[in-house]
Image (spheres, rainbow, N blue to C red):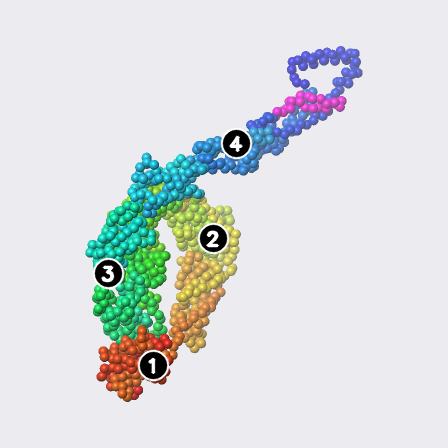
Amino acid sequence: MGYSKKTNKLYAAAAALAVTASVVAPVAADAASKVSVKYISPILMKHAGGSKYAVKKLTLPTKVKVKLSNGKYEMRSVKWSGSVKFEKKYINKYQVLYGKVAGTTKKAVLKVELQNYVVDIIEPVLEPVAVGGKVQLPSTINVQYKSGIIVKRPISKFNLKTPSTSKAGKYKLAYTYKGANSVVTGYINYEVKTANISNVMGSVDDQKLSVKADVMYPAVGAKAELLIYPGKNMSATPIVAKGTLSKGKFMASQGGIPEGTHSYVVKVGAVKSTAMDFTIASTVLASAKAIGKERVEVSFSRAVDSVTADNFKIAGATVKFATLSPDKKSAVLEVEGLEYGKDYSVDAKGIMVGGVAKDLGSLSFMTQSVEDIWMLEISPKASTIVANGADNTEVTFALKNKATGEVDKNADGIVLKLSTSFGALAKDRVTIQDGKATVLLTSEFSNTDIEAIIKAEIIETAAGDYKNLIGKIAGETKVKFSTIAVTPAPIEMINVLAAESNQADRVTIFLDKAVSRELLLKSFGLDKVMQGLHEEDYLANDNIQIEQFEGTKRVIGVKAVPSNPKAFELILDKETPLQDNAVVKLTAKITSNTDTEVKSKASFKLTDARQPEVTSVKAVGLNQLEVKFSESVATADFKIDGQYGEKYFDVLHYGFDNKMGVDRRDTVKITLKDNYPGLKQGYFAAGKHSLQVSSIYDYAALSDETNIGTTQNLDFTVAADTVKTTAGVVVESPEQFRLMFSKGLKKANILALLDNELKFERYNSNTKKYEDFSKYVDVTSYNKETGEAVIELMKDWTEIYDTLNTKENYYNDKFRITLAKDSIQAEANGEKNDALVLDLNYDGSPLNSPDLKSAEINTIDRLAPSNDFVVMMSEPVKIRDLDEYNTPLINSDGVVLPPKTTVEFIGKNKDGKIVTIDGSVLNYTDTTDKNFRVAANENLQKLVDMEGYGEEWKVVVKSLSDDVGNTVATATHDFKLMKTPPTPVLSPFEILKVTANEKNEKDVIRIKFTEGVQYSGMYDATSTANYVLNGKALLVGTTISLADSDDIVSNGLDIVKIKVPAGTLKTLSNVIVVNKDLQSYDNSVLTGGYEKAVLLGLN
């Protein structure tokens, strides 16, 4: 019963009644006064929601149930001492309170269990969504309880409404989460974005504009359009081209745009980009080029409707016909009256373009010179013959059209004057028939190798247009007279057919056959580095000469043209570019794979009508930009974000890498300086920026201002990057550690860091601290490209530990490499490192235990075709005097240096006796000290080929040591050097005998062959060009006839009769030399002797 004044009065009345009753019934009163509380029932309670989030707050009971001594129960009031606590530590535990119960001294017990309950909703961060898009809600939301645990709950438990995305803006999505006796409410933020259009770039091809852009958050269902405003009139109705949107990329194009300067805008839904200008150039003559002396090819900047001869005028000549190409972008004019090597101008008027007659302007062109159209190719059948006065080879002279590379079979009656610096030609004049002529070259005796230069020049002709070739078309080649007999190889000759260019820093040459870039590099002396010169330290020799206005241009490289194996670009020194709109002359001497050198010429007029332009801008890290142009550029001006000029950054124009054949002259790298005022000094802030590029000079613009490119503004985006540089380490041996940085470092001096920020430390088990051991190591290499540094011991561990006396070594301790905080800075983002601790005793580290295992030779590989070998080891080794530090071992024997490594090559000589050829260790092949190169001290191939040594060989590597002094077992590797095979003899065609002055045949030399000979064509045995008598050509008046020894026509005519003028044959002896390449009637090649003595009266 509760306490109040009213109950107090009732209690007094009851007491008076009790007194009265005691008088009346004393026995009953005694019984009532003995009732007491025998037991109080404990109370158990559970509560969730705490004091803040509970729907029903925790209230303690005011009464408890008691059992009386008379066996009855009643409720009595209770007053509790203490209170329930809601701290985290009481979750899921019972709290006990004790209460004072009315009418008894017994205590009531209350146990309250505080159940876990929700205290926070971890609201998810939602991705922005486009207008009309669907907000991507997670399937679950994290809920945090009082105890600290976080539990995922289904999204359906939060009573969310569908979020609206009809308008752009930032919104809140209300939620209500009901737990056990708790309710938590709040908001989830989301954003609806309008379309963001960036990186808009347009390109013009003919009358077509193509535009690309990046688009983020386009409204659902929004139309993507390209709006073109003719004449830049933004108030006019635009030309609308439908665009496409896919994965954030906008693309659209529109053709048939009229000439002039216009503006365009990218529109996505209701959002438009900033207007950008573009120009559709007027239709003009784009190029004019003479083809031979009777045709001119003109091209137009875009397709035209039609052309006639009347549309073109050339002063001093007559256009007879005009033929339009299938794509209508060029035409070939048939012209009369042009002269070789002369400047002309072609004027194009009244040409129909889009149904309108237009004047397309005029262009100058130069007809090709005689030298550009014709070449005289001299081809010896063998590039080397023996210098014995008898060996010989055929030399063929062919008049070729450079444009086609074909022999001009219409060329007849053209007389050549011939000469040779050594040896003898069977004729000093020869007449070309069907475009060719052949003469025999015979060597002269020499006790040293000499080189004969054969020259030919056109001196006479009766054939009309060929008269222009007299005195202008000549050729030369070389034949080596060797003191050593050689096997003739097929002759390969390489000619320059033509040269052209549309860039002033290079010339493209077109050859008559496909060759390797390496062959041209060797011919032009560009296969060897010449330190201290230009660009990539290469400079061509005199075998390639490019001239303009009597000045010579320097060639520094050769670039292959991927689409044409017969074309190559000759890259000029940046300091000696060509002058635009001027004649260029080229002379090349190219040596083929058969060691045949051919001299050829070409000329052209450089016309570069294109203006350079930027094609892309890309951010590299946070401090660099890579700008690509449409062609090579000499200079350009740059400005970032419309305010930061070149005082805030460095500009690097890439060049041509002749070693790799890679051309990057179209690329510029911009690197921010430390004074660039970004959020972080020297670095871009993440986000959108712009680059203005102006005054763009290609190399032609240096001499022709019309080639200077127009100003362009381009957007670029810099991605955020806050990743700091970290490092890892690999223990390659107990004395060598490789440190690997995750990023390229800015102004890193790893060697300077050692002993200061970078430390090599040993754990001292006595002081329980790491101590600096850096004085014992050194940084022996750092590769900025790979981010790797090699750290090596400068002393052997046995010396550092005094192992001889202490009996201790590295494996008794622990080691680490540490790098202090902020010691290094990443080049790409400027972030400095956190403190790094690199454990050198990781699982499997060679520092964990004694190194008792010797290094092993994994393999020895030959570097074919050389006689060098690479020896590959299982771990780093020491090679005395090859390592930076020899780190000698110290033991009971004193100081022990690494052994001297030896290399031997074992084979057999011509007598079968085993011989040993000493070898040498040349160098390590990388920074791991695991692989090194060895070579024989003599040319093994020469021993096999020239001195009869056997083909089976063995390379032996001895006396190696690993880093801690373990010796390595001797290793061998067997290999085979095949003897260079000789060219087999395939034909039995030989000279049987030579006689002179036989009966009735005075002054006649008879040559008897084993087979019939040919009497027409290149190997005509009746041609005086196939014989040399007493070292000289056959005299004028000599006649040659054929006879048959067996009267069997089917096996040919096998006797050659040479009737010489009286007195030609000497009294005692004569020597006749026959073309050693002569062929029989069935095409068998002459074998055996070809130099025969003729003794008068004895044969």
Type of the residue with mark 1 = Asp
Q: Amino acid at mark 4?
A: Lys
Q: Which residue is mark 4?
A: 161
Rendering quarter of residue 637:
top left
For marks 3 and 4 on the same chain, the one whose residue lies earlier in the sequence:
4
Residue 50 in view, yes or no: no
| N-terminal-most mark, 4 or 2 | 4
Disc 3: which residue: 369
Q: Residue at x 71, y 22 (%)?
A: 74
Q: Up-down: is 1040 above or below 1?
A: below
Query: Which residue corresponds to mark 2?
Result: 730
Kind of residue at disc 3: Ser
The disc at residue 572 is none
Q: Crowdedness of circle 4 by 10 Å Cα count: few (<14), some, many (20+)? A: few
Mark 4, secondary structure of its residue: loop
Spatial CA distance of label 3 from label 4 is: 85 Å
Q: Nearer the viewer, mark 1 or mark 4?
A: 1
